[in-house]
Image (cartoon, rainbow, N blue to C red):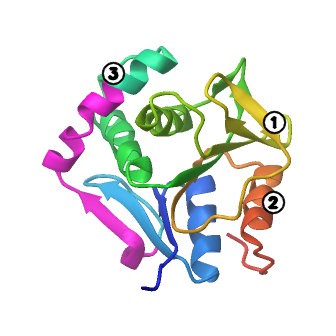
Amino acid sequence: MILQNLCLSGGAEGADLQFGMCAGMLGHSVIHWSFSGHRTTAPASEVVVLNEEQLQAADELCKRASVSIKRWFPPKSIYVRNLLRRNWYQVGEAERVYAVASIEDGNVSGGTAWATQMFIDRHDGAACECYVFDMISDGWFQWNGDEWSSIPSPPIPSGVWAGIGSRNLSPNGKAAIRLLLGYNGKVDS
């Protein structure tokens, strides 16, 4: 049996597309989860559009994550609600998660917080292979069951993994993704 590497992401500008591009250039398959009305510049062959029933199936998982990160679900905006629902598909089948965002006061920032928390919730809050590159401190962290612990670097992505993160990808965040995946190409994405 041949195992194939698969990167799951969300097709958003910034970290999502950078993870997808680097993974694809290295021969990993890539899926960018999307939904009707969501625009992405990801290659059409990598985009899977979720239907309304699939999106609604993520509601309970979003509600659970909202308690941990102390945010409200469902938001009033249907578009934002669907972005949060889509996060479940990025991490729901992943063996490990790699995210690029900021960690502020012990919490992952932005929409990335939802996806990382859903993955942590899959493991009932226990230590798991959820890795975050913090663009502020310029280093990698792993969830240890209680908090984000600094690590030298995570293992190289393989198997089914999620590559997600901030739309506002900093130069050090972009470099972290490329270094993690061993991609040294000249593509300007």
Task: Tell me if label 3 and label 2 are in contact, CB under 8 Å.
Answer: no
The residues colored magenta run 43-63
Q: Which mark sits nearer the N-terminus, 1 or 2?
A: 1
User: In the structure shown, which secondary structural element does the residue marked by tag 1 occupy?
Assistant: strand
Amino acid at pointer 3: Phe
Residue 73 location, x and y as percent?
A: 33, 21
Q: Is residue 133 above or below residue 4?
A: above
Question: What amino acid is found at the position of numbered circle 2 in the picture?
Answer: Ala
Most common SS among magenta residues: helix
* 115 left or right, relative to 54: right
Q: How many marks?
A: 3
The answer to which of 154 and 25 lies nearer the viewer is 154
What residue sits 79% from the left and 80% below the top?
A: 186
Q: In the rendered image, which quarter is residue 21 located in?
A: bottom right
Question: In the image, 83: left or right of 7?
Answer: left
| Residue under the point 47% across and 71% down | 30
Mark 2, other Cα within 10 Å: few <14 / some 14–19 / many ≥20: some
- Tell me if I can see residue 26 in this picture: yes
Residue at x 63%, y 81% (from the top left corner): 25
Q: Is residue 154 magenta?
A: no
Q: What residue would you read off at disc 1?
A: 150
User: Does residue 14 appear in this view?
Assistant: no
Q: Disc 3 and disc 1: Cα gap in Å?
A: 30 Å
Q: Which mark is residue 175?
A: 2
Q: Which mark is residue 73?
A: 3
* Residue 141 occupies quadrant: top right
